[in-house]
Image: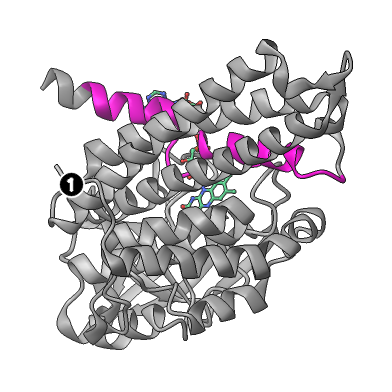
Amino acid sequence: MDFSLNEQEKMLQNLAKDFAEKQVAPRAAEIDRTGEFPLDLVEEMGKRGFRGLPYPVEYGGGGAGYVGFILTLEQICRASMTVGAIVSVNTVSEEGIFRFGNEEQKKRLLTPLAKGELLGGIGFTEPDTGSDPRMVKTVARRSGKGWVINGQKIFMSMASLLDLVLLFARREDADDLNAFIVESKSKGFAVQEVLETMGLRGLGASIVNLDDVYVPQGNLIGKEGQGFDILLDAISVERMSVAVQAVGVAQAALDLSIDYAKQRQAQGRPIARMQAIQQPLAEMASRIEAARWLVYRTAFLRDQGQDIQYESSMAKLFASQVAVEVTRLAMQIHGAYGTMKSLPVERLYRDAKMTEIYVGISEVHRSIIANKLLR
Ligand SMILES: Cc1cc2nc3c(=O)[nH]c(=O)nc-3n(C[C@H](O)[C@H](O)[C@H](O)COP(=O)(O)OP(=O)(O)OC[C@H]3O[C@@H](n4cnc5c(N)ncnc54)[C@H](O)[C@@H]3O)c2cc1C
């Protein structure tokens, strides 16, 4: 076992840390307060090559592997989980094309996404379901040399700014799903409403209506009826990246708590001298470290070409619980100041909760893990 990072990984981690501290952190509170999508930062991340890190250079990517990707994301999420989540969501569309697309699709669709020229997203969740593919009502009907899609998606991140969506729809003449790349400029693709969410503000989760949206056959990803397999595989990378979002948020909460505990006085001494404060700090650090290595190992396995559905569910389940508990403890350590909107702790607390919910709710991950254990 070798737990050390190589020189390229260390360099990438440092570059991401520098970018996060200088450019993202000063904007985090404003993004959260206004709920506005940070388009300039997203463009900057494209220029820096952060939007296609795991993919080969020949497809416009950074060739940094999934470990490089995770290391970068962790640093960005320490500054703003919303900004990190934008990279994660973009990656799921890239992953679907990279794993299941043909050569022409990789050149035409993956390359501009990975280069940061286009922004991609995912459209699975519908008003009636975010967990059960049998409940998907959006329908794809054959038409000429392509398909016509009708339905409604909800909570589609960044919908107003997306160029492409990896979208899942039921085949009209079969009981299964197809995966398509849908261009947002297509006639009939319309954002109905951007939803206000408790955390991850600025990610722009939206309701999208699909009204006779034509998709050419060339934008069908994988084989007909393969949509569910594509969803499970591509989303496993997004789950892993939500797990590292949780690690980043938890680490930020711990860092703030240590600083605060050193300077806040009670009974004539810094509260950091009290066991009542030292105990939770130690607990927070230990849990974060365990979550971090669970995610790093998942990324390492993906770099070996392995299926990570089980590991990514475990990593997300555990890391999101850690983030919720660590940010709760951080609020306690900060006392009343933790509740103030002008300080970052309450934002971290709200963002942490999101990691237990989006990209598969914790209960679903427990089911995935239990199914494998009992198989
Ligand atoms: C900010 C944000 C951004 C998002 N971005 C996107 C996006 O870009 N694209 C997209 O497609 N979706 C997106 N989502 C949707 C998100 O992934 C889903 O909301 C999530 O997967 C949960 O689905 P649901 O809300 O329909 O919950 P449901 O599936 O309705 O679950 C509700 C409850 O039922 C229980 N439950 C359901 N199924 C099971 C099961 N199999 N086993 C045990 N318990 C179960 C759970 O306990 C859960 O608490 C986003 C959501 C948010 C909040």
Q: Is 208 placed left or right of 38 in the picture?
A: left
Residue 263 in the image: state x and y as whole percent: 81, 34
Instruction: Name the chief secondary structure element in magenta.
Output: helix
Q: Which residues are magenta?
A: 342-370
Q: Is residue 167 visible?
A: no
Residue 353 in the image: state x and y as whole percent: 60, 34
Q: Is 115 placed left or right of 279 in the picture?
A: left
Q: Is 282 placed left or right of 339 in the picture?
A: left
**Coloring scheme of the render?**
one colour
- Please tell me whether residue 19 is drawn above or below residue 325 in the rendered image: below
Q: Is residue 177 visible?
A: yes
Residue type at tag 1: Asp
To which residue does mark 1 refer?
2
Q: Nearer the viewer, residue 75 or 173?
A: 75
User: Magenta includes 349?
Assistant: yes
Q: Nearer the viewer, residue 37 or 326?
A: 326
- Please tell me whether residue 237 is drawn above or below residue 72 in the rendered image: above
- Specify the quadrant of the image occupied by residue 164: bottom left
Residue 291 in the image: state x and y as whole percent: 40, 34
Could you classify mark 1 by the number of other residues whose Cα lies within 10 Å: few (under 14), some (14-19), or many (20 or more)? Answer: few
Q: Residue at x 48, y 70 (%)?
A: 15
Q: Residue at x 88, y 13 (%)?
A: 267
